[in-house]
Image: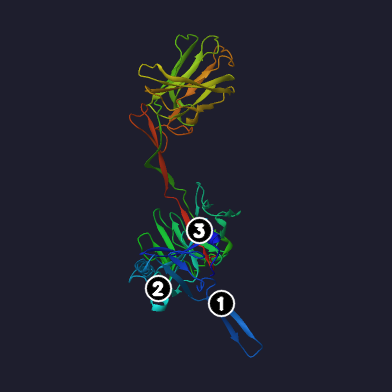
Amino acid sequence: MQARPPAESEDTLKIFLESQSGRIELVTGRDSEFLLGEKTSGLGVAQKVSRLTRGSGVGASYRGTRTESRLADLHVFVRGADRTATGTLYERLVSIAVPRAGGPLPLLVAEYADGRTFELPFVYLSGLELSGTASGPRMAESLISIECPAPFWTARDALSFSVANESSGVGLLPNLAQLPVSRSAAIGSITLENPGDVDSDISWTITGPGGPTPISINGVGFVFEAVLQSGEVITIVRTPTGVKVLDQAGANRYADLGPAPKFPRLPAGISVVDIEMANASPGGWEPTTDIIQTNRVTSPSLRVSAEGWQAFGAGLARTATGFYGSDAGFLALTWAAASTPEAAVQVQVPAAVGDVLSASLSVLSSVAQTVRVMTQFVDYAGAPVGPLTLGGSVELPANTPVVVGVDSTDLDPAPEGTVGFRFMASVDVVGGRSWAVGDTFAASLGIVTASPARTVFFDGSFEGAGWAGTADASESVLFDRVRVNQSTVQGFYKPRREVVY
């Protein structure tokens, strides 16, 4: 490894020494407390040993190549402001490069500007023995010899992919949002790219219920033959002493593998991974205690927004409206006599000074009609506080529910004196049409939240939601959910590189 110009060193790659004792950067190409010198070697391609068989004929037969442990020398200058400072820095270097008994090996760490980080564990051999010719009042120079048992630079962060049953049918479907992958035509077969330049160890986690589970990479693999119950988890991982197959309790389950199992590594580049699990389950969703949103609208709380209109009859109800695909309170207006376009419904919810709200209603008219959205903050007496916000016109096709509303970006925060918020869907008296006998105009219960954008309607009767107080008479809260008892197979691997540069 050679020193590079300062700009390239700073912008592309940084090299560190790291252990439990701390971390130092080995800078190339410019002055630093720790400078990586030009005599550094062994950080390129690791040593190779090729096997050649010689017979009675001409030449030899090639039998393959293996990679030896990596031997490297780190040419390090330690520079301090004076002899005392240099000594302190040198002690810091020693504490990091020479591991403590029983602790993990120290690391060479390569960090790229794009966030990729690769590690190379090493064993200290020699070179930190100070001599008078290698040290001075402000500088100490060492050629540190190290050996790396695992010769390849390995990514610090593992990449993962999963195959899961996302539907009620039997079989597994790939879910690969975290990786640059593409799905093939076969269920459970995926095309996977390993961005490293050498193969990578891959570990597997199989989560029941379901089984048997065959897994292969480019046609080579194994079968975990046992049928797992819900809650059973099998981990298959390669260790320096071999492959371990353990369940969630730590018990050895190697005997549950099929005949002649093979555990291939994931090659660099593109590979095809085939995974199947018989009797796989999609599982279900369970709410957590984490609240996503609170719907401030109670049930029922819609009302006619004008007094003295005698041409129609109105009624409140709570039934399946079809507006949001669930039970929701709604207000239906039915005209008993012909009338001018005036009609409106509103939701009113508690609000406080500074609230930033989003709101929506689903409205339904038996005839084509034009409506406007209006909002107003009010005080204790119901008097307006601040201006009336008037939205644009929305065209309603006949007998077609349409969601109308406002996002928080359309509204200012609630002003001083606010105790309530009104949200109205009003027929446009200019663009609207007159009502005939039997015409209807209805609006659903609606939703008002502190979300920056309008959200899908929910109330306490929804799956994953609950009432904040008395059912059908209080705010409702929507909880985050987690999937449980889903059959999955996950793969984890860390890309490896021969060289960092």
Reply above or below: 120 against 56.
Answer: above
Instruction: State the mark number for residue 457.
Output: none
Q: Which residue is mark 2?
A: 136
Give the residue number, with chain letter if any, for mark 3. Answer: 116
Q: Quadrant of the C terminus?
A: bottom right
User: What separation in Å lies between label 1 and label 2 (alpha carbons)?
Assistant: 45 Å
From the viewer's side, name the closer residue of 273 and 129: 129
Q: Nearer the viewer, residue 343 or 498?
A: 498
- For the residue pair 127 and 44, the one nearer the viewer reads as 127
Question: Quadrant location of residue 353?
Answer: top left
Q: Could you tell which of marks 2 and 3 lies nearer the N-terminus?
A: 3
Q: Tell me the kind of residue under disc 3.
A: Arg
Q: Which mark is residue 65?
A: 1
Amino acid type shown at disc 2:
Gly
Sequence-first disc among 1 and 3: 1
Decide which of tag 1 and tag 2 comes sooner along the chain. 1
Quick one: 161 or 85, which is closer to the camera? 85
Q: Residues within 10 Å of mark 2 (few under 14, many from 20)?
A: some
Q: Residue at x 55, y 17 (%)?
A: 428
Q: Position of residue 134 (x, y in %)?
A: 42, 76
Which quarter of the figure has residue 130? Answer: bottom left
